[in-house]
Amino acid sequence: MQTLKATIQTNVVNVFVGCFWRMGTGHYLLNLSLTLSNLLRVVKARMAVHLFRFMTPVVSVALLQCRRSPRTTGQLLTLTPLTTIGTCRSKKTWPKTFTEEELRKRLTPMQYHVTQEKGTESAFTGEHTDNKEEGAYHCVVCGTSLFTSDKKFDSGSGWPSFFDLINKESIAQTDDFSYGMHRVEINCSQCGAHLGHVFDDGPRPSRKRYCINSASLSFQSKNGASEEAEPTGAAGQLPSSKNGEL
């Protein structure tokens, strides 16, 4: 049953891709009706209803990726291939690289999940969310300086938020289309560690809100005392979140 669902889902989505990729908006309804008619001929009516409900989220995400083609002035739409749904990042070699074995030994499970697997800690659970001590925040993986405490503010989001960076070159930005929305992911420019996302609803003067996972940061207080990651820290944190913020 599951195999049949997956097969039909894949075939129908491929038809959607072909319809939107090759035709203008004036033709897609016809192709949609033909697709559903063919589906009804293949499976029983009751199963078709269940499959339609099952495929609706997938098709919806595909439609959300449609955008106007910059090369045309008409209603022609181009479709972002389904392989790009999720975080879109070009393959590159970061200046600083570490082996998986080394990182798993050095980082807590939560730090590894966030920085290497693009995870998200649950809101209001991070150790740096309410930290008001003066100092600087660094990438927990490679130590690159990212933010200072005087640029930190309470956004009410549940994650550490900053309105400016120490150095604009310290992060890399990439488009993220996960969960059916468009966000801008930020990574450490030196090691590629996932940090969080940046939004355009921050305070003046930058109007930026860098929404960062505590697990991706290490803090060094103004007096020079640097924190040490505790291996048991991640085990006590709540499960990772899929909140739209991060």
Image (spheres, rainbow, N blue to C red):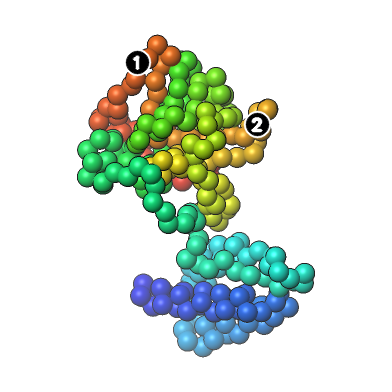
Taking 166 as reference, is 144 left or right? Answer: left
Q: Position of residue 3 (x, y in %)?
A: 35, 75
From where the camera sits, is residue 69 visible?
yes
Q: Which residue lies under the disc numbered 2?
A: 206
Taking 145 as reference, is 199 left or right? Answer: right
The kind of secondary structure element at disc 2 is loop
Residue at horizontal 25%, vertical 30%? 232
Q: Which residue lies under the disc numbered 1?
A: 225
From where the camera sits, is residue 156 visible?
no
How far apart in space, not on screen, are marks 1 and 2 (Cα)?
29 Å
User: Image height check: is 22 above or below 245?
Assistant: below
Using the image, tell me which numbered label, if any, was put on residue 200. none
User: Image height check: is 177 above or below 246?
Assistant: below
Q: Position of residue 218 (x, y in %)?
A: 38, 27
For marks 1 and 2 on the same chain, the one whose residue lies earlier in the sequence? 2
Residue at horizontal 68%, vertical 67%? 69
Q: In the current view of this chain or complex, which residue is farthest to the top?
A: 223
Quarter of the image with the N terminus is bottom left
